Image (cartoon, rainbow, N blue to C red):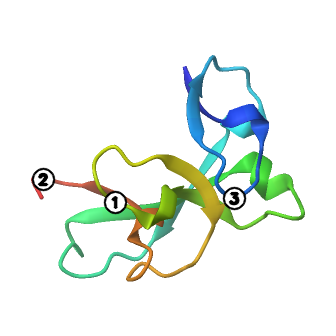
Amino acid sequence: MCASLYGGNVANGTPLILWTCDGGYDQAWQFISQPVAPPYSGHAQCYTISNMAAFEDMYNPDQVIGVDGGNIRDGADIVLWSFFNDPVNHPDQYWCVFDGPV
């Protein structure tokens, strides 16, 4: 199974779904390393995650995975959205891997 964009759509708000892997660009993801702000610096590596179908679409080249409405609570939907490049006000677009308990 692969993380995929619903219907291959690259519009803002398109949900991510699990789908049988088929090699499509809507299932191809690019992890882009981002600086880590305190208090996590030195303990995490953070990324934005871009979809290759959106990257190839001349109208939506700057879209990343985010949390719908910026809601970072349990159960929130994961969607494709325009990148804000703002980790303070939009932490929902940054995905971090920690080297120990947080």
The image shows residue 81 at horizontal and vertical percentages of 63, 61
The image shows residue 27 at horizontal and vertical percentages of 67, 35
The image shows residue 74 at horizontal and vertical percentages of 28, 48
In which quadrant is the N terminus drawn? top right
Q: How far apart are marks 3 and 2 (CA)?
A: 33 Å
Residue that badge 3 annotates:
12
Q: Quadrant of residue 28?
A: top right
Q: Mark 2–mark 1 contact, CB under 8 Å?
A: no
Give whichever of 41, 51 is nearer the camera: 51
Q: Which residue is drawn at 34% across and 60% down?
A: 72
Tag 2 secondary structure: loop
The image shows residue 75 at horizontal and vertical percentages of 34, 43
Q: How far apart are marks 2 and 1 (CA)?
A: 21 Å
Relative to residue 37, is residue 58 depicted above or below?
above
Mark 2 / mark 1, whichever is N-terminal: 1
Mark 3 / mark 2, whichever is N-terminal: 3
Q: Residue at x 73, y 38 (%)?
A: 26
Q: Residue at x 57, y 50 (%)?
A: 79
The residue carrying pointer 1 sits among few (fewer than 14), some (14 to 19) or many (20 or more) residues within 10 Å by Cα, namely some
Which of the labelled discs sits on residue 100, or is there none? 2
Name the side, left or right, on which 28 lies relative to 36: right
Question: Farthest residue toward the left?
Answer: 101
Q: Mark 3–mark 2 contact, CB under 8 Å?
A: no
Residue type of the residue flagged with mark 2: Gly
Residue type of the residue flagged with mark 3: Asn
Which of the labelled discs sits on residue 72, or is there none? 1
Tag 1 secondary structure: loop
